[in-house]
Amino acid sequence: MDSGEALLLDAVPPSVQPDDNRRGWAERSGDFSPAYYADIGPNEVSETLAAVFEHYVDEDAAILEVGCSSGRHLAHLLDRGYENLTGVDINGDALDVMAEYFPDLAETGTFRVGAIEDVVAEFDDDAFDVVYSVETLQHVHPEETWVFEELIRVTSDLLITAENEGNSPQRGRDGAEVSYVNDEFPLFHRNWKRVFSDLGLAQLLAEPGKRDTVRVFRVL
């Protein structure tokens, strides 16, 4: 998020532990669950991603979405001709919901259930041409931000973030390193341009939306 550099560990309430953070998403039902997002379907971010892909990405590219949930964004890409699709989500209901709402995607893509910190480590270097996330990296606990480097390791060309950076002119929440969504789960505010620039990527594009900002980074 645009509130400064990487989140300071001492700014995180001690009650927020990595295992609890992951468990909350793995067991989630109701709001922000796979069924919740499937009911909403593709949205403004899906359209922005499709436009970015049309400009930067070949149709035969290998694509990974981390935190894919029931697959609404991947389904939107499939409809536009991208078929080499892989998704990872921590919630065990995600694939069943995908099969119900987006059956073509369920049959076409490759999917894994598990935490991105665990699953991404199993992929080979440069396994994907494009890796992207939508409102997922913002929930990565500060003790597990090493996974950002893993995402770069498995990306041969582009890394795309679509994270909630607020809707103020400054696109962030100055002075607030963490907030809570519905008083339930933490959202960690980071300067995504700085995070991935400091890890050696070059930002090609930043496209602010109503809530999320889409940023396109290239591996140098």
Image (cartoon, rainbow, N blue to C red):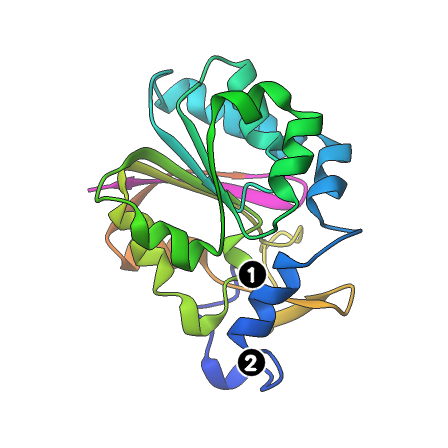
Q: Residue 139 got which mark?
A: 1
Graded by Cα atoms within 10 Å as few (under 14), some (14 to 19) or many (20 or more), the crowding at tag 1 reads: some
Drawn side of residue 27 relative to residue 133, left or right: right
Where in the figure is residue 150, as x and y percent of width and height? 31, 54
Q: Is residue 121 above or below residue 178?
A: above
Name the amino acid, label 1. His
Q: Is residue 166 magenta?
A: no
Q: Is residue 57 above or below residue 132?
A: above
Where in the figure is residue 219, as x and y percent of width and height? 24, 42
Q: Quadrant of residue 185?
A: bottom right
Q: Nearer the viewer, residue 100 or 218?
A: 100
Graded by Cα atoms within 10 Å as few (under 14), some (14 to 19) or many (20 or more), the crowding at tag 2 reads: some
> Which span of residues is magenta-colored?
208-220
Total residue callouts:
2
Check contact, mark 1 vs mark 2: CB within 8 A: no
Q: Which residue is mark 2?
A: 12
Q: Please, what secondary structure does the residue beneath circle 1 have? A: helix
Q: Nearer the viewer, residue 197 or 75?
A: 75
Earlier residue among tags 1 and 2: 2
- Identified at 49% across, 53% down, the residue is 114
- Identified at 51% across, 59% down, the residue is 2
Magenta highlight: main SS: strand
Q: Residue 124 got which mark?
A: none
The reply to whether residue 187 is visible in this rendering is no
Quadrant (top left/top right/bottom left/bottom right) for the C terminus:
top left
Q: CA distance from mark 1 to mark 2?
A: 12 Å
The reply to whether residue 108 is visible in this rendering is yes
Q: Is residue 219 magenta?
A: yes
Name the amino acid, label 2. Val
